[in-house]
Image (cartoon, rainbow, N blue to C red):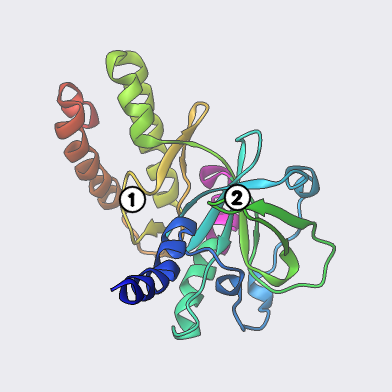
Amino acid sequence: MRKILFIAIMLSLPFAATRLTQGFRISKLRLDWPADPKWETSVPASLNEILSEPFTFLGKGVQSFVFESPDKRYVVKLLRFDRKRDKTKYIPLFNACKTAYDRLKEETGLIYVHLNPTAIDLPIFHCKDAIGRSFEINLNSVRFIVQKKVEELEEVLLRERNDPIGMQKRLDQFFHLIRSRASIGVWNKDPSLSRNFGFLGGQAIEFDFGNYRIDPNLDPNREMERYHKKMRRWLSKNAPEYYNSTQ
């Protein structure tokens, strides 16, 4: 019986470790894919200062592991890859990141996107994972994103619920963002409110843009209506008194 229990415990350890670390491993950051000139970007002068202190693990998304700066002003998203997946499946993700950086940098809070392996003088990224292990990552060899950190949309709207003027301002900021994006023919394949949007100061930010697509024939009015429906659904559940504020 003891032997069976010991074997069961030993077999469960890898699963427990994965759960605690949320699956973060350096090997998941590697993608054997050559550099493509269309994904090149210039390094901002502020990057070294932003990355000068160790970042801590914040969470895991579908496409990345997310780390937060000590002052909570920035996040670094280390793109993660499945070695079993067809590499060409990542092309839309890279294109979406480049679209956001080139066309909607302010609207997405972007500082920098690094989509090609490089041999430039990028700083070493010091970070700690979910269980406090320290890592030093050569940023030249991984694909990553640096963004301003935002407050998530739901947190802000719930906080503004008792302030009609503040709530209306937030809704106006949100729809201004959607209109601005749609007006240049960019839409998000994933229209989620909670996963994608937040606020930074007096501006709405679409911090998750990994599903951006370019459509020259995009109808801004139809795109607006798509998000009006999403927002009305959210308001009906969380702040019904503002349901008609999106008309």
Label 2 crowd bin: few (<14), some (14–19), many (20+), radius 10 Å? few
Quadrant in the picture for the C terminus:
top left
- Residue displayed at 38% across by 44% down: 178
Quadrant in the picture for the N terminus:
bottom left
Q: Residue type at mark 2?
A: Gly
Q: Is residue 13 left or right of residue 140?
A: left
185 shown above or below 28: above
Q: Position of residue 11 (x, y in %)?
A: 39, 74
Q: Secondary structure at mark 1?
A: helix
- Residue displayed at 55% across by 72% down: 28
Q: Position of residue 173 (x, y in %)?
A: 41, 31
Which residue lies under the disc numbered 1? 220
Disc 1 versus disc 2: distance between alpha carbons? 45 Å
Q: Is residue 234 left or right of residue 80?
A: left
Q: Main secondary structure of the magenta part?
A: helix
The number of numbered discs placed on residues in the rendered structure image is 2
Instruction: Please tell me in which quadrant of the rendered image residue 190 appears.
Output: bottom left
Instruction: Pick whichever, 45 or 177, lies toward us.
Output: 45
Instruction: Pick whichever, 135 or 93, lies toward us.
Output: 135
Q: Which residues are magenta?
A: 98-109
Which residue lies under the disc numbered 2? 132
Q: Is residue 232 left or right of residue 184?
A: left
The answer to whether residue 244 is magenta is: no
User: Is residue 212 among what the camera can see?
Assistant: no
Q: Position of residue 81 (x, y in %)?
A: 51, 73
Instruction: Pick whichever, 17 or 104, lies toward us.
Output: 17
Q: Is residue 137 left or right of residue 84?
A: right
User: Is residue 219 among what the camera can see?
Assistant: yes
- Residue displayed at 64% across by 41% down: 69
The answer to whether residue 99 is magenta is: yes
Label 1 crowd bin: few (<14), some (14–19), many (20+), radius 10 Å? some
158 shown above or below 196: above
